[in-house]
Image (tube, rainbow, N blue to C red):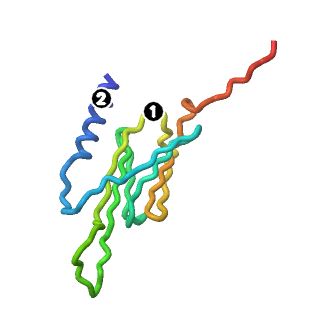
Amino acid sequence: MEDAKKNIEKAQAKDASLAERTKDRVIFTPAVDITEDSNNLYIYADVPGATEKGVNITLENDVLTIEAQVEEAPMEGYTRTYSEYATGDYYRAFTLNEAIDRDKIEATLKDGVLGIVLPKAEAVKSKKIPIKAG
């Protein structure tokens, strides 16, 4: 019964992430790299133009959500006649499993790259088993 309740909550969280926004802005899905070592998973998301104040990372119902708002820099004294670069906000969500220690998640932002460290729970880390002689 408890598993069914969690599945419903996850589905509701997923549905909420697909909801229409009230802001009339372009929403980009940031490109990410996900890497792993024996202790952590790492997510690196490209969010050019975002600042620490504009980034919001939340974890609810096993869904890690990245939202970033970017303010468009005005071009004083100029009129844009052509542009290949668009400014907008960023949104991406990931479902985490029980292998992540939620209390130790950390994030940094440098040069338009958001880095998130997802520590593995002790129960899922690899352990070396010593061999006893005899």
Judged left or right of residue 117, residue 3 is left
Q: Residue at x 31, y 70 (%)?
A: 71
Q: Quadrant of residue 77?
A: bottom left
Q: Secondary structure at mark 2?
A: helix
Q: Quadrant of residue 75?
A: bottom left
Q: Residue at x 74, y 20 (%)?
A: 131
Q: Look at the picture and state if 81 lies above or below 34.
A: below
Q: Residue at x 30, y 67 (%)?
A: 85
What residue type is disc 1 on?
Glu
Mark 1 or mark 2, which is nearer the start of the sequence? 2
What residue type is disc 2 on?
Lys
Q: CA distance from mark 2 to mark 1?
A: 16 Å
Instruction: Please give the residue where the numbered disc 2 appears in the rendered image.
Output: 5
Q: Residue at x 23, y 46 (%)?
A: 18
Farthest residue, direction bottom:
77
Judged left or right of residue 129, residue 115 is left
Farthest residue, direction top:
134
x, y percentage for residue 80? 24, 78
Q: Quadrant of the C terminus?
A: top right
Instruction: Please give the residue where the numbered disc 1 appears in the rendered image.
Output: 98
Which label lies toward us, 2 or 1? 1
Q: Quadrant of the N terminus?
A: top left
Q: Nearer the viewer, residue 17 or 26?
A: 26
Q: Secondary structure at mark 1?
A: loop
The circle on residue 78 is none
x, y percentage for residue 76? 29, 85
Q: Look at the picture and state if 84 lies above or below 36.
A: below
Judged left or right of residue 85, residue 112 is right
